Amino acid sequence: MRHIGAIPASLLGLALAGCGPVTPGGAELLPLRLSFSQLVPIERRYGHYEAWARVGGQAVSLGRFDRTEDGVPVGLGGGKLPPEPVSAAATEVFVTQEPPGDADARPSKQVFLRGAIVGGEAVLRTPLTEAWREAKGVYILDNPFTWQDGTDYNGIWFGYYDRDARAYQTGLTLPEAPDGTMYAGWVILKGVPLRVGKFRTALDNDDWGVYSGRTGASELIDPVGRPMPGEDFFTNLPAGVETGPNKPNLGGATVIVSLEDATLAHEDQYPGPVRVLTATVPEAPEHMKPYAFRNVVGEQVPSGIASFQ
């Protein structure tokens, strides 16, 4: 089965060019060219990308970068990445999403692209396969956990309410997350990321409940409802986000289901570059109406090529 995101000829290119004689171990230093497709931009206040090579078991940085709104990868200082030649003995290239302010020589756990170097070239892929093209789902605006007024809908839940069964039902169809990863739900409200939490399958509760005051293991208020990922945006919200009855207003927000490293700390997170499902909340949404996600695996799953020059 081939991997998602076959790399088109029109890949966005950026060169890590340089020269140097040999490494202390005797291996030649060579310029490495990296080309990427379908990278999503990261607002600088939420982090950046970094490319790495694996040399003798050690991770060596190839440069920090971001992607502009028009799709061009650029160094954090603007323009092309600094020239960083790499040892010809490198065995792997991988790319991470780094947290804001990161300047150390260690890769983050959020590795989203990687590939072994074979014949001077590495094809960089995510862990997704064709199975993710069948992913789908719905979400509702509701606050079942912090329910006070039946008209409040300042929460996002990845499911729907079955009025005949009087129960919440799971609304996602997803393959189980690959080993070492979990799905993560997000709401981007006026540029501010709000966590929904991580989950391994569509039949799980998520692991985040700070905004609603619940624990990840707790059931929904409806005792016959099935577990499902979701969050009420009720308390402990980031600065600048409105609170109160029917606040924050989620109209126009972006909803994301991404694939993340399972061990990432919440404080280090921003929606990962591997997006599976996304949606835009209507400007005037209806309470408890199921809204469909859009499968973006064909257009938002990144890929890349690394090759020695």
Image (cartoon, rainbow, N blue to C red):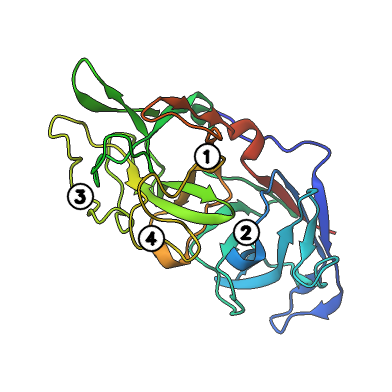
What number is the disc on residue 95?
Answer: 2
Secondary structure under badge 4? loop
Nearest-to-viewer mark from 3 and 4: 3
Asked if one can make out residue 214 in the rendered structure from this viewpoint, the answer is yes
Residue that carries the numbered disc 4 in the rendered image: 263
- Image position of 213 (left or right of 240): left
What number is the disc on residue 251?
Answer: 1
Which residue occupies the foreground of this view, 188 or 115? 188
Q: Which label's residue is closer to the chain start, 2 or 1?
A: 2
Quarter location, residue 266: bottom left
The quadrant in which the N terminus is found is top right
Label 3 vs label 4: CA separation?
17 Å
- Image position of 24 (left or right of 159): right
Label 1 vs label 3: CA separation?
28 Å
Label 2 vs label 1: CA separation?
34 Å
Label 2 vs label 3: CA separation?
32 Å
Q: Is residue 16 above or below residue 275?
A: below
Q: Which label's residue is closer to the chain start, 1 or 4?
A: 1
Q: Residue at x 43, y 28 (%)?
A: 286
Secondary structure under badge 3? loop
Name which residue type carries label 1.
Answer: Gly
Quarter location, residue 11: top right
Label 4 vs label 2: CA separation?
17 Å
